[in-house]
Amino acid sequence: MANKEPEEALTKYGLMRKEFLKEHRRGIYTGMMLEGTLKEHCLTIQQQAEELMDVLIKQMSREQGVDEKLKALDQMKWVRMMNIIRASAEEMVCNEIIYI
């Protein structure tokens, strides 16, 4: 009896994990495909990555003083800082969750 795949769609981080396994962990990818567990695994990774992104963005924003006050005073600076924070957080998420 085959496992029923979850219906939830893969988004950015789930798709990144799937592609990473396909390209760099071929044996794991093939095994999960045969067992019917690949999508469930990718959804789990996706959820973990999204949760970690939220935590890191909040933490880094707080540490760097990127808040609503800054947004009101200098919106362009706020946007620049948030873009830097998001990029840093995403790099950490990829290195700690996606590409392992």
Image: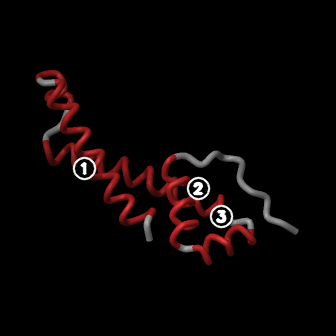
The residue lying toward the viewer, choosing from 9 and 34, is: 34
Query: Could you say where residue 15 lies in the image, as x and y percent from the top left?
Result: 55, 53
Which residue in the structure is indicated by mark 3? 38
The amino acid pointed to by label 2 is: Leu
* Residue at image location 19% in from the left, 38% down from the top: 81
In the displayed structure, does residue 85 sit left or right of residue 41? left
Label 2 to label 1: alpha-carbon separation: 24 Å
Q: Which residue is mark 2?
A: 43
Q: Check disc 3 and give the amino acid type.
A: Leu
**At x 83% / y 66%, what residue is drawn?**
2
CA gap, disc 3 and disc 1: 31 Å
Nearer-the-camera pick, 59 or 29: 29
Left or right: residue 60 compared with residue 41: left
N-terminal of the pair, mark 3 or mark 1, is: 3
- Left or right for 67, reference 34: left
Residue under label 1, please give it.
59
**Residue 53, image x and y in percent?**
37, 50
**Relative to 98, residue 30 above or below:** below
Question: Residue 26, percent across and down?
Answer: 59, 73
Q: Indicate the quadrant where residue 30 lies.
A: bottom right
Q: Quadrant of residue 78?
A: top left
**Point 17% across, 37% down: residue:** 66
- Asked if residue 51 is positioned above or below residue 41 in the image, the reply reads above
**Badge nearest the viewer, 2 or 1:** 2
